[in-house]
Amino acid sequence: MKMSKSSSLATLHTSLTLLPSYQDKGLSLGQNILHRLQSITAIFVNALASPTEPKIWQKKDAKGNRIWQIYDPVTGHKARFDTEQEVRIWLEKRYNS
């Protein structure tokens, strides 16, 4: 079945009317999409550009014991701890000194 240009436009128009109305918020569809893309981009840029929170993860050593490792991107400090309590003490010193 071949569709004419006018029937294709009518189908497109019908499909678009089923999308949420962005006019209620005072934004056109294009403005809303642009706004959302800018928000997503800002989240990624902030996460990549200024990592200030310490990274903390668990590993197992050669003997199978659980160890905690930290990396502080602000100071470049790396450390290894045997217990979660030691990690908590380090965090408190970092934020309270």
Image: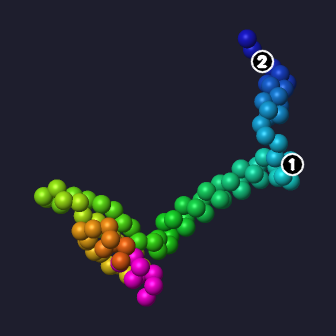
Q: Is residue 94 left or right of residue 67?
A: right
Q: For mark 1, what is the residue?
A: 24
Q: Nearer the viewer, residue 19 or 65?
A: 65
Q: Secondary structure at mark 2?
A: loop
Q: Name the residue: 79% across, 32% down.
A: 18
Q: Residues within 10 Å of mark 1 (few under 14, many from 20)?
A: few
Quadrant location of the N terminus in the rendered image: top right
- Numbered badge on residue 77: none
In this figure, which residue is indicated by the disc labeled 2?
3
Q: Viewer-proximal residue, 21 or 8?
A: 21
**Image quarter (top left, top right, bottom left or bottom right) of the C terminus:** bottom left
Q: Residue at x 58, y 61 (%)?
A: 43
- Residue 39 pos. (x, y %): 65, 59
Q: Nearer the viewer, residue 89 or 20?
A: 89
Residue 57's spot in the image, x, y percent?
A: 33, 62
Q: Is residue 84 above or below residue 93?
A: above
In the image, is residue 81 above or below residue 39? below
Say what amino acid the circle numbered 2 marks.
Answer: Met
**Tag nearer the camera, 2 or 1:** 1
Question: Quick one: label 2 or label 1, which is nearer the N terminus?
Answer: 2
Q: Is residue 79 left or right of residue 92?
A: left
Instruction: State the SS at label 1.
Output: helix
Give the extent of the magenta segment: 90-97
Is residue 3 on the magenta stretch? Answer: no
User: For the view shown, which residue lies furthest in the front direction?
Assistant: 85
Q: Quadrant of residue 89?
A: bottom left
Say which residue appears at 78% left-offset and 30% top-offset.
15
Q: What is the basis of the colouring in this image?
A: rainbow
**Chief SS of the magenta region:** helix
User: In the orientation shown, which residue stands out farthest toward the top?
Assistant: 1
